[in-house]
Amino acid sequence: MSAEPSRDWNVFKQIFVDHWDGFKRVHARYNKRYYDSLVDKMLRCGNPEKMGYIEYRCLQCGEGKHLVSMSCKSSLCLRCAKVYVDNWVSQVSQMLHEGVIYRHIVLTVPALLRTTFYQNAHVLLSAFMRCGVKCLDDVFTRVSGHALQGGYIVVVQTHGRHGQYNPHLPIIATSGGWDRKASQWRHLDYIPYRLLRKKWQWYLLTMLRQRVRTPAINRLVDACYTRYREGFVTNVQKGDVPARYQSLARYLAKYVVSPPISLRRIDRYDGHRVTYHYRSHKSERVEQETVEVSTFIGRMVQHVFPKGFKRIRYYGVQATKTFATLKGLIQEALAQVKGIVKGAMKIIAPMTYRQRYQQSTGRDPLRCPHCQHEMGVWRIWHPTYGLIHDELKAIERGKYASQAPRVDPASEPGRTLWPASGGIPLSLPGLQ
Ligand SMILES: [Zn+2]
Ligand SMILES: [Zn+2]
């Protein structure tokens, strides 16, 4: 494994360089190529010689230069987490429909079940998401007295504030649902809390019993009914102002896709122990915790999802193409109960590398500091595929030689960076 410090080195990477090999030997579950590659990508991230880069140059004065290292997109990478949050906000905000009232609901798993959940995560995670949706449809149906199908954006989250395993489902749900029989949207003003708690308990425990068929699970399920007589904890966000959709998406993103422990929360690492801080839910204060380095690594990797797992899913009317048609009916129904619903939602476009850089430094990275002209792509280099684009070579071949239009069937199709087939999986943050 590559161990030498890069210019983007940090304490988080150092912890993995020092202890990953030892950790995976003790924890066989993580001794797999998949995890190795996530760690390896994370360690190389930010190092242009290892990850590949796009080099920008000022084609006007030749002085200005800017190097953009390609991102690794490893779910363990703290550098890439920020980009991921921005893209997520954009994705979710595009799925929220103007004029439709949504609520933020969180369905949780009680402490008694978390270990079992962790051990069976590969068979439970998808079923977990589906059973949250079934539960809400059932509650909506029960409350309205009509068979309803709501619309849901469901995310699965596995960590609590200090990195421990605490699976829960943050859901953005329509406030009401589609009554297929009556061809009518039925708006629900409230969700009865007691009913939701009990229903959630029943759906979750039934799902567990069906997916993990062991005598131990049956005992655990029975214990849960005895111990949690009021059902399982569910939180429903109060208020339903459409104008807040944007902030809802952003709030959710911070809460949902942020890394279990961010870099700025790591206070100390002495080679064996890690100290970090977090804001506690219980005390509402910042608390500090010191753990063995293996515990720390465990708290990070236990939240890595199975390969290819989709963490954001759309269900019910939200997932159908007909939602566009339904939207009109939903808005009409809402207008009848609430007066005109003003949609103040804007679609948030994902930020480009250039915008993110500008936002954090106040400087446009692609403007030449010497002559203020916009710089152009000079070279694109990838560790496996080598030089993908070389502007100098293109110039030597006569790219700018003649102003007269001419047709050359043998010429390259301009600046196509992507091969026509095969598809090199490159992420080119500067070109987005
Ligand atoms: Zn210049
Ligand atoms: Zn990265």
Image (cartoon, rainbow, N blue to C red):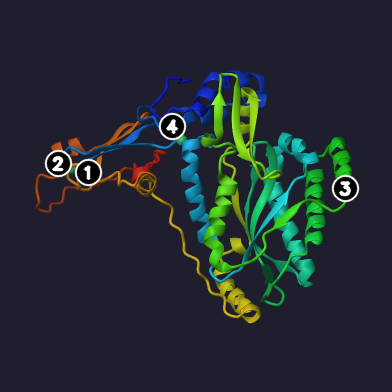
Give the number of the mark in front: 3 or 1. Answer: 1
Q: Residues within 10 Å of mark 4 (few under 14, many from 20)?
A: many
Residue 320 point in image, percent of width and height:
59, 63
The residue that label 4 is drawn on is 45
Amino acid marked by disc 3: Tyr
For mark 2, give the secondary structure: loop
Query: Circles 3 and 1: CB distance less than 8 Å?
Result: no
Cβ of disc 2 within 8 Å of ligand 1? yes
Q: Position of residue 286 (x, y in %)?
A: 62, 40
The amino acid sitting under disc 4 is: Cys
Q: CA distance from mark 4 to mark 1?
A: 25 Å
The foreground one among 240 and 67 is 240
Kindly tell me whether mark 1's CB lies below 8 Å from ligand 1: yes
**Any mark on residue 368, and which?**
1
- Please state which amino acid type lies under the numbered disc 1: Cys
* Mark 3 or mark 1: whose residue is earlier in sequence: 3
Q: CA distance from mark 4 to mark 3?
A: 47 Å
Confirm or reject: label 4 Cβ below 8 Å from ligand 2.
yes
